[in-house]
Amino acid sequence: MKKKLDILVNGIFKENPVLILLLGCCSVLAVSVTVEGSLGMGVALTFVLVCSNVVISLLRNIIPDKVRIPCYIVVIATFVTIVQMVVEAFLPALYSSLGIFLPLIVVNCIVLGRAEMFANKNTVGDSFFDGLGMGIGYTMVIVGISVVRELLGNGTLLGFRIIPEGYQLGIITQTPGGFFCFGCAIAILVAAMAKKGKKFEPTMGCDGGCAGCAMSATCTDAKKKEEAKV
C-alpha cells in the first residue's frame, strides 16, 4: 500500500504533470480563465487518465508493440467520448465553456505520456494510482491559476462578485495573462526548490525501459542513462 501511496503523491508533487513534466500546458493556459471551467477540465482529465491507464495496463501484454500508440488513442478516445456525452447532456454551460479542449483530451500529452511511460509497464493497481495522482496534480495547478485569473481579471470567484466593478485587470483573462500566471507558478516552484537545495529539471518521469519508449530519441533521461553506461 505504501508503494501505491508513493505513486499517488509522486503525480501530485514530485512529477506534477504541468509544473515538472511540462505537459498539458495548452489546456491550462486556455481553460484557466474561470474556476468552474478549470474544475470541469480537471475532473474530466482525471477520469480519462484513470480509466485509460487501467484499461491499457490490463491489455499491455495483448497490444502489439508496433501499433500500441493507435491502440492507446482508441482507448482514450472511448473515455473522452463518454465524458463529452455526459457533460453535454447534464452540464451544457460547462460543455460550451470548455469548447474544443474537451475532445482534445484524446491527444493530451499527459494522457498519452502516462499510457506509454507507466501503464504500459506496470500493474493495474499501480496504473490506477498513477492516473489519479497525475489527474489531481493537473487539477491543482489549473484550478490554482484560474483562481488568480478569475479574481484579478473578472473580480469574481465561481460567479460571485469579490472585487468591485472597475478594479479588474482585463489582460489577466487574455492570452498574455495566461502565460504570465503560468510563468509565475513556475518561478514560485523554482524558488521553493532552490531554498531546499534542489535544482529544477523538467523530466518525462519515466522509470526505466528507455529502449522501448517512443520518446527515447529526444528524452534527456535516456541520454543520461546511455552516457552512464559508457
Image (spheres, helix red, strand yellow):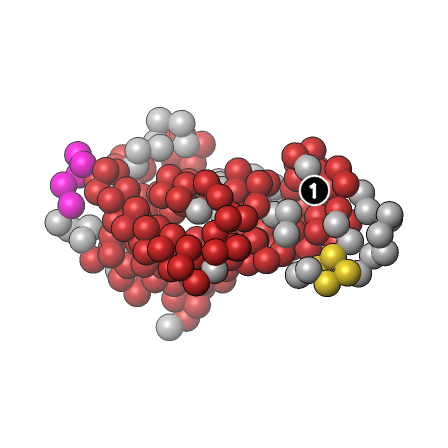
- The overriding secondary structure of the stretch rendered in magenta is helix
Quadrant of the rendering where the C terminus is positioned: top left
At label 1, counting other C-alpha atoms closer than 10 Å, the crowd grade (few under 14, some 14-19, many 20 or more) is many
Between 122 and 85, the one lying in front of the other is 85
Q: Can residue 39 be seen here?
A: yes
Between 75 and 136, the one lying in front of the other is 75
- Residue drawn at point x = 32 percent, y = 56 percent: 82
Q: Can residue 224 be seen here?
A: no
Q: Residue furthest bottom?
A: 1
Could you tell whether 152 is left or right of 224 in the image? Answer: right
Q: Residue 75 location, x and y as percent?
A: 25, 49
- Residue drawn at point x = 70 percent, y = 48 percent: 149
Check the image and report above or below for 126 versus 30.
below
Q: Which residues are magenta?
A: 63-67
Q: How many marks?
A: 1
Magenta span includes 104: no
Could you tell whether 136 is left or right of 124 in the image? Answer: right
Q: Residue 198 location, x and y as percent?
A: 63, 47
**Which residue position holds label 1?**
173
Q: Secondary structure at mark 1?
A: helix
For badge 1, the amino acid type reads: Thr
Quadrant of the rendering where the N terminus is positioned: bottom left
- Residue drawn at point x = 27 percent, y = 50 percent: 78
- Residue drawn at point x = 78 percent, y = 53 percent: 155
Q: Residue 160 location, x and y as percent?
A: 73, 63
Check the image and report above or below for 71 versus 51.
above
Q: Residue 22 location, x and y as percent?
A: 52, 40
Check the image and report above or below for 140 versus 215.
below
